[in-house]
Image (cartoon, grey):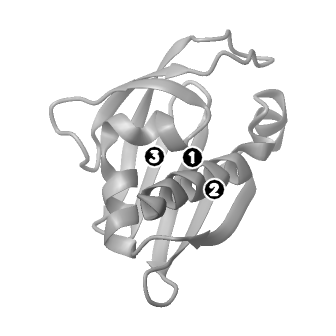
Amino acid sequence: MSFLEATGELLSPRPDAWALVSEPFHLPDWWPAYTGVEPDRRGLAENARWGVVRSKAPGFLRRPEGEGVIVITRVVEGYELRWHDVRQQLDAGVLLDNAGTGRTRATTFVSGPWLRLVAEGARGLPERALTRLQDLCQTAAAL
């Protein structure tokens, strides 16, 4: 198994960053592998199964805009969200921690078989997700 991560600061207090990452319909806003999500009735809860629409970029073992399912594997309110992408056989998520007044330290990650990470183009996912989170928090801070 390979583990890839990216860590950086968000210009947002942790509760605000959590409000963004914990809203199911915002997942495609910051996680670049998905363009759509349909949470089940449980919403953000461990073992919830969400339907996802994948990005337009093709992968070696997947078609562009294909549908899939993710299972929420861990929720620590205000701090941690993890999920398992069933078809891609990848685990992913975000960890949040305080980083001083009005800032949040965020770590985005993806793990899975090395070949799967390479074949699916997942190697850059943590960095792209972190950049999207930073951009979203920067935009909110500017308002």
Q: Which residue is mark 2?
A: 130
Q: Which residue is mark 3?
A: 83
The front one of 125 and 86 is 125
Query: What's the distance in space between the residues labelled 3 and 2, CA to CA?
Result: 16 Å
Q: Which residue is mark 1?
A: 91
Query: What's the distance in space between the residues labelled 1 and 2, CA to CA?
Result: 16 Å
Mark 1 and mark 3 in contact (Cβ < 8 Å)? yes
Instruction: Say above or below: 67 vs 130.
Output: above
Q: Position of residue 136 (x, y in %)?
A: 51, 51
The front one of 101 and 83 is 101
| Camera-nearest label, 3 or 2 | 2
Disc 2 element: helix
The mark nearer the N terminus, 3 or 1, is 3
Q: Position of residue 121 (x, y in %)?
A: 79, 32
Instruction: Say above or below: 83 vs 38.
Output: below
Q: Position of residue 12 (x, y in %)?
A: 44, 70
